Amino acid sequence: MKLNDHILLWNHVFIQVMDVRHKKIEEGEELRTYRLPASAFLYAIRGNARITVFTG
């Protein structure tokens, strides 16, 4: 899909970006105490990851 097609689609989506965070995690590192502020979108740039999310 071309960039302009993406832009047209995203212009019709009801989403507000409230906060953007960047965290580089080294191999073997864990973020056990990190709390997400609300809904989240996680994006891996390189490599692969296993994510476990606890709620409650």
Image: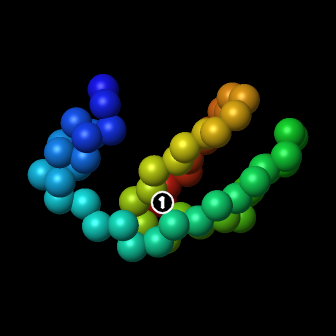
Q: Position of residue 5 (x, y in %)?
A: 22, 36
User: Toward which corner of the image does residue 49 lie, by quadrant?
Assistant: top right
- Is 21 in front, or is 55? 21
Q: Is residue 24 left or right of residue 37?
A: right
Confirm whether residue 13 shows in the render. Answer: no
Q: Residue at x 51, y 66 (%)?
A: 20
Q: What residue is shown with label 1?
A: 56
Q: Residue at x 55, y 43 (%)?
A: 43
What's under tag 1, amino acid-wise? Gly
Q: Secondary structure at mark 1?
A: loop
- Name the image colouring: rainbow
- Quarter that holds the N terminus: top left
User: Toward which corner of the image does residue 45 lie, by quadrant?
Assistant: top right
For residue 43, above or below residue 35: above
Q: Residue at x 78, y 50 (%)?
A: 25
Residue found at the far left of this picture: 12
